[in-house]
Amino acid sequence: MQIQRIVWDLDDDPDGNVQHIAEHGVTVEEVEDVLRGTEEVVASHSSGRPITFGETSTGKYLAIVFDIVEEDPLSVYPVTAYETEP
């Protein structure tokens, strides 16, 4: 899976995805780290949305739930991201 574009809300949007992932102690850069290297995507057990897992350059292991915004080029909207066990 080769993600071409990652869609972010404005940094100061209190209801946006940037603020939401920050509440979980995760940065935009860490999410992009994992999404750009994504090889395997499965369906989230709780939401049914696509989810992927991976390690960031900062050493965190993240779960990232996202929506597909556009197929070609592949564009995704991160819904949430949180640290988890490998």
Image (cartoon, rainbow, N blue to C red):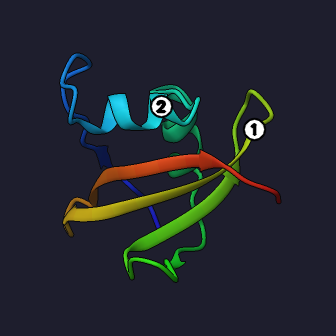
Q: Residue at the spot x=39%, y=82% of the render?
A: 48
Horizontal arrangement in the rendering, residue 20 relative to residue 61 (left or right): left
Horizontal arrangement in the rendering, residue 16 relative to residue 79 (left or right): left
Residues packed near mark 2 inside 10 Å, few (<14), some (14 to 19) or many (20 plus): few
Mark 2 and mark 1 lie on one chain; the one further toward the N terminus is 2
Mark 2, residue position: 23
Q: Estimate the x, y position of residue 15 in percent, counting from the top left.
A: 20, 35
Q: Quadrant of the C terminus?
A: bottom right
| Dot label at residue 60 | 1
Residue furthest top as drawn: 12
Distance from disc 2 to disc 1, alpha carbons, whole Å, reads 15 Å
Frontmost residue, 80 versus 76 = 80
Residues packed near mark 1 inside 10 Å, few (<14), some (14 to 19) or many (20 plus): some
Q: Estimate the x, y position of residue 45 in percent, counting from the top left.
A: 52, 83
Q: Estimate the x, y position of residue 39 in percent, counting from the top left.
A: 60, 67
Against 5, residue 58 (above or below) is: above
Horizontal arrangement in the rendering, residue 13 relative to residue 6 (left or right): left
Q: Residue at the spot x=30%, y=39% of the render?
A: 17
Q: Amino acid at mark 2?
A: Glu
Please tell me in which quadrant of the rendered image residue 59 appears.
Answer: top right
Against 58, residue 81 (above or below) is: below
| Dot label at residue 11 | none
Q: Secondary structure at mark 1?
A: loop
Q: Amino acid at mark 1?
A: Lys
Against 58, residue 82 (above or below) is: below
Horizontal arrangement in the rendering, residue 20 relative to residue 43 (left or right): left
Q: Estimate the x, y position of residue 58 in percent, counting from the top left.
A: 75, 27
Q: Secondary structure at mark 2?
A: helix
Q: Residue at the spot x=57%, y=38% of the render?
A: 33
Q: Residue at the spot x=69%, y=38% of the render?
A: 56
